Amino acid sequence: QVQLVESGGGLVQAGGSLRLSCAASGRTFSNYAMGWFRQAPGKEREFVAAISWTGGTTYYADSVKGRFTLFRGNAKNTVYLQMNNLKPEDTAVYHCAADVHRSTSTYARDYDYWGQGTQVTVSS
């Protein structure tokens, strides 16, 4: 079993930055691909970013490409989502997820463990 806990969300003005963290405990987290998804009120959950278990490959949604960066921490049990130049449309609850099959998928259905989420609110 893997437990994921997100942190770092908050309220920020448009153009500002936040860094989200996802800390894992339980099994061998460093062997898992990781992803971030977000869900805004009244909308479906959408893919944000994913990173391979080695950290060598990353994928981003077009809407965040060039503004968000996903990377693994040195301790290997934490991943970080650096979000710069935030826009009001980035407002959502952000969830991290772990994929034990290492597919580095952009689809939520491929992820096995999920955190509870952290709220990000961007004011205009």
Image: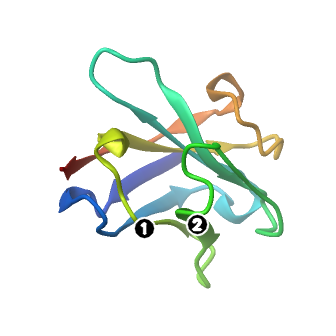
- Residue with the mark numbered 1: 84
Q: Based on the displayed image, in which of its 4 quarters is residue 115 positioned?
A: top left
Between 1 and 47, the one lying in front of the other is: 47
Q: Is residue 99 visible?
A: yes
Q: Residue at point 39% right, 64% down? A: 85
Q: Amino acid at mark 2?
A: Thr
Q: Report the mark closest to the observer, 1 or 2.
A: 1
The reply to whether the C-beta atoms of the residues labelled 1 and 2 are less than 8 Å apart is yes
Q: CA distance from mark 1 to mark 2?
A: 9 Å
- Judging from the image, the colouring scheme is rainbow
- Judging from the image, what secondary structure is the residue with disc 1 in? loop
Residue at image location 54% in from the left, 55% down from the top? 26
Q: Which mark is residue 69?
A: 2
Farthest-out residue, bottom: 74
Q: Position of residue 33 (x, y in %)?
A: 73, 52
Q: Amino acid at mark 1?
A: Asn
